[in-house]
């Protein structure tokens, strides 16, 4: 090769390298976080479901780590999501009192540092695709909480037609939003999972040269459940199975796209659910398998959900971790991985990277985990394998001052909470009761406010434009 040619090649390489470096704002691995709505602990084939088929999520588990004692911080949507995105107990950020309905005027305070804020500050492009449910007034939507891009429903898919009964207050309609704008009213719910995924695929493809965070809180399988025509009537588990299998196929579409773009090894993929199955809806609800109870309860089935993490080369393939971890750990764990500073305000989660990586002898850093009812009342505490339920019934009606006796379960040996050992261990019951009350008092004393916004981003009332959507 003559010297001119060699020199030209060198110059060309340097220039191209510089252009590539400029294109690529990558500062760490991409993050894709799937967070389904009301999917039970057992509603995946890799979690033991006998008739639901989820080959793509199973593959994720086979290529990563499945955590079998993973808890969300509340048995309901809004508080659970607040905890996932802030690393805090819902009560610390005052999001613990049930869910946000279309007429409500508050949401997660924008002073809170969300996972999206944290990754955005680290140079990530951030997108939220699906159900938000942390406030839908102006200033409280995803673009105000660290996301660059948003597409989806700002609250639950049952907050329009499902609640439409004569004489009640639920005369609302469902907006499909892009960014801060409503682009469609009453979208066809059969297509929600597919449309949401289409938006994810576009985002991932557009940002293949950037570090990106895609948060994917699917609206399904929250009732009323819908699958697209392609999936309707295809699962042996019935309509609920159709819905889960469609979610699985769409998770697979995202995994395929990561492969096609060569991003598989450089992307952390997480899969979980915001709370347990909604059992009163019978066949339209899911299953918590061996766990007792479901959504809205403090039995294990309410908050103990599936969790899978895949990160090739970092998380050993095909591993299972039964150490306790919680949704509040996701933010500090990812912060450590991408070398981001933790929020300056107090958070409750812990870095569980050692558990994800399967480090020998790694133990859960969670010393205790406090349970709250769906309405935000103190409900119990877990320490080690012991779980105390105040008032004992786990059904959301218990309280620290209730007249019923407390119940004590060894939930690692008795995952179904069948054997109340309170009478056998009265000292432990007293100790855990005092612990629960102390931890709750500490949270209450330090709780930070939500944010109230009087203006509306859109009018959610069904008859707002003098129109009836007729559905
Ligand atoms: Ca939910």
Image (spheres, rainbow, N blue to C red):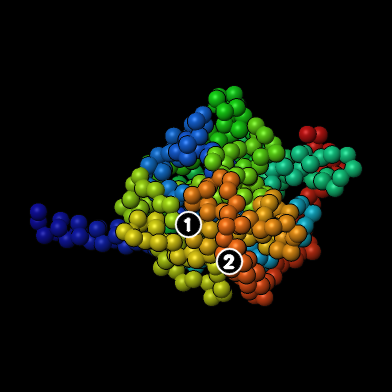
Q: Residue at x 76, y 59 (%)?
A: 403
Q: Is residue 133 visible in this depiction of the protein?
A: no
Q: Which mark is residue 427?
A: 2
Instruction: Locate the C terminus by quadrant.
Output: top right
Query: x, y percentage for residue 127?
Result: 54, 54
Query: x, y percentage for residue 139?
Result: 69, 63
User: Depth-wise, is mark 2 or mark 1 nearer the camera?
Assistant: 2
Q: Quadrant of residue 455?
A: bottom right
Residue nearer the viewer, 143 or 372: 372
Residue nearer the viewer, 326 or 6: 326
Query: x, y percentage for residue 74?
Result: 62, 56
- Element marked by disc 2: helix
Question: For the view shown, which residue lies furthest in the front direction?
Answer: 424
Q: Is mark 2 within 8 Å of ligand 1?
A: no
Q: Report crowding for label 1: few under 14, some 14 to 19, many 20 or more residues within 10 A (C-alpha).
A: many
Q: Is residue 395 above or below residue 186?
A: below
Residue that label 1 marks: 324
Marks 2 & 1, CB-CB < 8 Å contact: no
Q: Is residue 64 visible in this depiction of the protein?
A: yes
Instruction: Locate the N terminus by quadrant.
Output: bottom left
Q: Is mark 1 within 8 Å of ligand 1?
A: no
Q: Residue at x 31, y 52 (%)?
A: 313
| Left or right: where 28 falls relative to 467 | left
Q: Residue at x 34, y 60 (%)?
A: 361
In three-dimensional space, the C-alpha distance between marks 2 and 1, rounded to whole angstroms, equals: 24 Å
Q: Which mark is residue 278?
A: none
Q: Residue at x 81, y 40 (%)?
A: 164
Query: x, y percentage for residue 287?
Result: 58, 38
Question: For the view shown, which residue lies furthest in the right direction?
Answer: 167
């Amino acid at each position: 090769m003559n010297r001119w040619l060699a020199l030209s090649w060198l110059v060309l390489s340097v220039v191209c390298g510089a252009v590539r470096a400029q294109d690529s704002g990558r500062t760490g691995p991409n993050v894709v976080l799937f967070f389904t709505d009301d999917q039970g602990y057992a509603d995946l084939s890799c979690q033991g479901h006998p008739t639901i088929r989820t080959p793509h999520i199973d593959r994720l588990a086979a290529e990563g780590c499945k955590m079998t004692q993973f808890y969300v911080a509340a048995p309901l949507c809004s508080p659970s999501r607040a905890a996932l995105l802030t690393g805090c107990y819902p009560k610390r950020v005052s999001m613990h009192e049930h869910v946000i309905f279309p007429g409500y005027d508050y949401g997660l305070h924008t002073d809170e540092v969300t996972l999206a804020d944290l990754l955005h500050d680290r140079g990530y492009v951030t997108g939220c695709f699906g159900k938000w449910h942390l406030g839908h007034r102006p200033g409280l939507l995803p673009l105000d909480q660290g996301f660059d891009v948003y597409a989806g429903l700002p609250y639950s898919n049952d907050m329009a037609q499902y609640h439409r009964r004569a004489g009640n207050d639920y005369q609302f309609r469902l907006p499909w939003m892009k960014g801060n704008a409503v682009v469609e009213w009453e979208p066809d719910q059969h297509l929600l999972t597919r449309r949401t995924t289409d938006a994810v695929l576009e985002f991932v493809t557009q940002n293949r040269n950037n570090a990106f965070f895609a948060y994917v809180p699917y609206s399904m399988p929250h009732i009323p459940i819908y699958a697209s025509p392609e999936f309707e009537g295809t699962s042996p588990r019935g309509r609920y199975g159709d819905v889960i299998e469609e979610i699985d196929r769409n998770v697979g579409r995202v995994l395929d796209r990561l492969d096609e773009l060569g991003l598989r090894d450089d992307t952390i993929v997480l899969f979980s659910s915001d709370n347990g199955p909604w059992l009163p809806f019978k066949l339209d609800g899911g299953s918590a398998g061996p766990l007792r109870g479901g959504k809205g309860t403090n039995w294990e089935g309410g908050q103990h959900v599936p969790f899978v993490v895949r990160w090739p080369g970092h998380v050993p393939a095909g591993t299972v971790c039964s150490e306790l971890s919680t949704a509040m750990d996701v933010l500090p764990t990812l912060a450590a991985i991408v070398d981001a500073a933790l929020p300056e305000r107090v958070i409750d989660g812990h870095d569980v990277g050692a558990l994800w990586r399967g480090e020998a002898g790694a133990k859960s850093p969670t010393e205790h985990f406090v349970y709250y009812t769906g309405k935000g009342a103190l409900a119990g505490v877990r320490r080690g394998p012991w779980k105390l339920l105040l008032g004992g019934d786990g059904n959301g009606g218990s309280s620290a001052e209730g007249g019923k006796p407390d119940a004590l379960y060894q939930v690692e040996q008795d995952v179904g909470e069948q054997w109340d050992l309170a009478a056998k261990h009265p000292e432990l019951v007293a100790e855990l009761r005092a612990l629960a009350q102390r931890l709750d008092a500490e949270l209450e004393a330090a709780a930070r406010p939500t944010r109230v916004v009087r203006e509306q981003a859109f009018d959610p009332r069904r008859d707002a434009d003098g129109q009836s959507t007729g559905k």
